[in-house]
Amino acid sequence: MKVLRSLLSVAVLGSMIAFTGCGSKGGNQEPLSDKQLGLLSKTWKVKDVLLGGADSTSHWSNFKLTIAGTKGQPTSFTYTCTGRPPRSVWPASGTWTFGDGDPSTPDDPATQILRDDGAQITYTVDPASANLQLRFTFSGAGYTRVNNVSGAWTFDLIPN
């Protein structure tokens, strides 16, 4: 009986030692939305712009997009635009959130942005925050004098 008790004590002690330090994986990891906000928050300038697959970069050469926000506050963030061309799918400023605005699908902060005007933007940003691509279809009237801005847009941006 003494041997059984000793073996049981050793087994319990061994288990305690084996599991000590086994906390939850990534318990102190930064939330994905905060990580993505950190990558996106800066002023971006145009590298390439496509409208329906056709090069439109020359019309956007002075365009700059500034994305800002505060980590830990997942409600909405801001953007401002300068150097917009006469045909602009970007308002001068506004707010955005992570997600696609569709309550029937899960939001993905790693790939989705929803602008305050309802534009659903799919984005990719590299881990070094050196390239940002924004893709969306715009069907509104535009934010400047010319209404002909409808179509599939792709903005390839680099840090300013």
Image (cartoon, grey):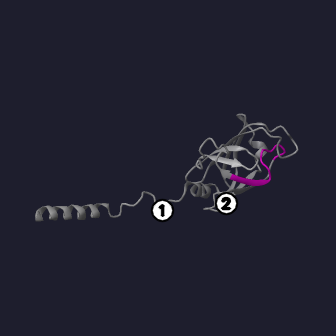
Q: Secondary structure at mark 1?
A: loop
The main secondary structure of the magenta stretch is: loop
Badge 1 density bin: few <14, some 14–19, many ≥20, Cα 10 Å: few
Q: Which residue corresponds to mark 1?
A: 28
List x then y, in percent, for residue 91. 79, 50
Q: Nearer the viewer, mark 1 or mark 2?
A: 1
Horizontal and vertical percent position of residue 24 = 42, 58
Earlier-in-chain disc, 1 versus 2: 1
Q: Residue at x 60, y 52 (%)?
A: 130
Residue position for label 2: 69
Asked if residue 81 shows in the view, the reply is no
Mark 2 burial class by Cα count in 10 Å: few <14, some 14-19, many 20+:
many
Q: Nearer the viewer, residue 63 or 108?
A: 108
Three-letter residue code for mark 1: Asn
In the picture, measured across the screen, residue 62 lies left or right of residue 112, that is right
User: Where does residue 122 sit, x and y in percent of width and height?
Assistant: 64, 43
CB atoms of marks 1 and 2 within 8 Å: no
Nearest the viewer among 160 and 106 is 106
Q: CA distance from mark 1 to mark 2?
A: 21 Å
The span picked out in magenta is: 85-96
Q: Say whether residue 51 is left or right of residue 19.
A: right
Q: Secondary structure at mark 2?
A: loop
